[in-house]
Amino acid sequence: MNIIMLCNLGMSTGMMVKKLEEEAKNRGIEAEVHAYPMVELDEHLEEADAILLGPQIRFALEDIKKQAGEVPVMAIAPQDFGMMNAGNVMNQLEKLMKKG
């Protein structure tokens, strides 16, 4: 699974990427997580199985959903991002992907 995380290029995004990759590995899920600035989505959309938005850009959720088409898109809750709660983010992502 290839997860794209969109952000405004903060240091905390890099930490969340690592936490999500660790969480996926612990669950036996083969996943790569890459962080890109929101303006680069077009360049990476083809490779995405899921798109996560950092809380700082959650305002763009509906626009990115339209742009992403069939690719599931989810905004990370500010409290999960702040606490680096990759387990909860992964739980929500798995639910979202089962719906799709």
Image: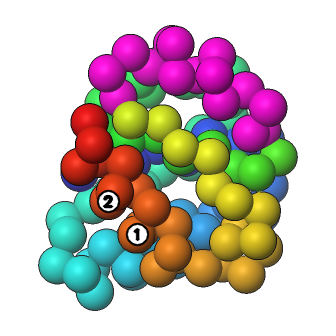
Query: Badge 1 local density, few (<14 within 10 Å), some, or many (20+)?
Result: few
Residue at 53%, 44% (x, y): give it: 74
When the figure is inspected, residue 27 is found, relative to residue 39, above or below; the finding is: below
Colouring convention used in this rendered image of the protein: rainbow
Residue 97's x, y, as percent? Answer: 29, 47
- The kind of residue tagged 1 is Asn
Closest to the observer, 8 or 51? 51
The residue range painted magenta reads: 57-71
Tell me if I can see residue 67 in this picture: yes
**How far, Cα to Cα, is label 1 from label 2?**
5 Å
Tell me if I can see residue 15 in this picture: no
Q: Of helix, strand and loop, which mostly describes the magenta segment?
A: helix
Residue 55's x, y, as percent? Answer: 76, 51
Of all residues, the one furthest to the front in this rendering is: 99
Residue at 28%, 43% (x, y): give it: 99
Residue at 73%, 81% (x, y): give it: 83
**Location of residue 39 by image quarter:** top right
Of all residues, the one furthest to the bottom in this rendering is: 26
Left or right position of 91 against 85: left
- The kind of residue tagged 2 is Glu
Query: Badge 2 local density, few (<14 within 10 Å), some, or many (20+)?
Result: few
Closest to the observer, 25 or 27? 27
Secondary structure found at label 2: helix
Residue 70 lies in the magenta stretch: yes
**Where does label 2 land, which residue?**
94
Residue 67 lies in the magenta stretch: yes
Counting every numbered tag in the picture gives 2
Residue 68's x, y, as percent? Answer: 44, 20
**Where does label 1 land, which residue?**
91
Left or right position of 48 against 14: left
The quarter of the rendered structure image containing the C terminus is top left
